[in-house]
Image (cartoon, rainbow, N blue to C red):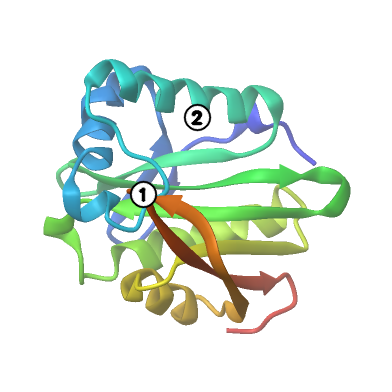
Amino acid sequence: MRSWVGIKSIKTERLTLRPIKDSDLNHIFQGLSHSEVIKHYGISFTTLQEAKQQIQWYDDLIKNETGYWWAIELSESNEFIGSVGLNDIKKEHHRGEIGFWLLPEFWGNGYITEAASNVINVGFETFNLHRIQAWVESGNNGSRQVLKKLGFIYEGILKDYEIKNDQYISVEIYSRLVDNSV
């Protein structure tokens, strides 16, 4: 397995995926405080100071070699539109988890599918993963559809698995194995 520190930007047809940096703090806060983004997302922030924890989390993933997240930018304008990455990588089990979010004004353009397909390739080829999984809050139809396009298979539902906004929520689990063909 190559070092996480050496991973750089990924260019796609319309996007640039680049390592997240400290100067992305305002963008991260903009996304992870937006009511539509956090509706089905596991974390949210109400202050810029709180969002610094997320930047530290991204840095810790790299330092501990347990994941890697990229900023998603439109190639033509370098405009920040979201983030995608792998986390909770367990080297001994060759598995990790994919996550992503996109600012709502960019939904419905296939950007997440385009970005995530490249991150999946990095997971299998660079990080030597055998399994990539995704946890999706029930009701998050957008993420569910993206995962299906990416060749993920629905494995089941964990009923009343977490509490969010003082309500129990169920979580669906999806996976893709290295030898899945899409």
Residue drawn where x is 58% and y is 35% of the image: 7
Asked whether, in this view, residue 132 is left or right of residue 54, the answer is: right
Asked whether, in this view, residue 10 is left or right of residue 76, the answer is: right
Q: Nearer the viewer, residue 167 or 114?
A: 167
- Using the numbered discs, state the Cα–Cα distance from disc 2 to disc 1 in whole angstroms: 27 Å
The image quadrant where one finds the C terminus is: bottom right
| Above-or-below relation of 92 to 3 | below
Residue 168: in sight, yes or no?
A: yes
User: How many C-alpha atoms fall within 10 Å of the one at disc 1: few (<14), some, or many (≥20)?
Assistant: few
Residue drawn where x is 24% and y is 49% of the image: 75
| SS label for mark 2 | helix
Q: Quadrant of residue 21?
A: top left
Q: Please name the amino acid that badge 1 sits on.
A: Asp
Residue drawn where x is 46% and y is 60% of the image: 116
Asked whether, in this view, residue 87 is left or right of residue 75, the answer is: right
Between disc 2 and disc 1, the foreground one is 1
| Above-or-below relation of 127 to 182 | above
Residue drawn where x is 80% and y is 41% of the image: 1
| SS label for mark 1 | loop
- The residue carrying mark 2 is 58
Q: Nearer the viewer, residue 105 or 117?
A: 105
Q: Nearer the viewer, residue 34 or 12?
A: 34
Residue 141 image label:
none
- The residue carrying mark 1 is 166
Q: Quadrant of residue 175?
A: bottom right
